[in-house]
Image: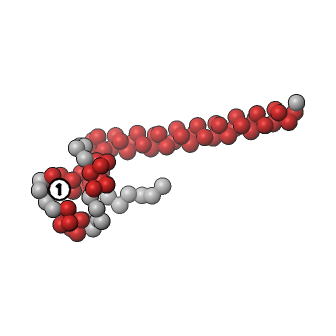
């Protein structure tokens, strides 16, 4: 998984600057990002605590998806093994 270059706190701080009236091009140049629009779609209107909670939920969701995929592979392997015995 790709590691984010900016923390949630930094992203939300940049978005607050944008909401305060700073121009997008100036913010992008100042903070070294190409666009702020992707952040606004994901983090717009959030507080730092909400963003941290979102990240925790995304990580938990990824772990659960991985566990489900492993269980489905195990079940498929068992079904195949049982069908060969019969």
- Looking at the image, which residue is at 34% across and 40% down? 53
Q: Specify whether residue 13 is in view.
A: no
As drawn, the residue found furthest toward the top would be 86
- Image spot of residue 80 (x, y percent): 78, 37
Tell me: 61 left or right of 19: right
- Looking at the image, which residue is at 20% across and 66% down? 25
Tell me: 31 left or right of 69: left
Tell me: 5 left or right of 83: left
- The residue nearer to you, when weighing 64 against 39, is 39
- Looking at the image, which residue is at 82% across and 33% down? 83
- Identify the coloring: secondary structure
- Image spot of residue 58 (x, y percent): 42, 43
Residue denoted by label 1: 18
- The residue nearer to you, when weighing 55 against 18, is 18
Question: Would you identify the image quadrant in which residue 23 lies?
Answer: bottom left
Q: Relative to 31, does residue 45 appear above or below in the rendering? A: above
Q: Specify whether residue 72 is in view.
A: yes
As drawn, the residue found furthest toward the left would be 21
Mark 1, Cα crowd under 10 Å, few <14 / some 14-19 / many 20+, is some
- Image spot of residue 54 (x, y percent): 35, 42
Question: Element at badge 1?
Answer: helix
- Looking at the image, which residue is at 27% across and 68% down? 32
Total count of labels: 1
């Amino acid at each position: 998984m790709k590691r984010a270059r900016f923390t949630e706190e930094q992203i939300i701080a940049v978005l607050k600057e944008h909401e305060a009236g700073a121009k997008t091009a100036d913010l992008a140049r100042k903070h070294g990002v190409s666009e702020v629009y992707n952040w606004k779609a994901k983090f717009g209107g959030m507080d730092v605590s909400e963003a941290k909670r979102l990240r925790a939920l995304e990580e938990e969701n990824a772990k659960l998806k991985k566990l489900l995929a492993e269980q489905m592979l195990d079940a498929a392997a068992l079904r195949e093994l049982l069908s060969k015995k019969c």
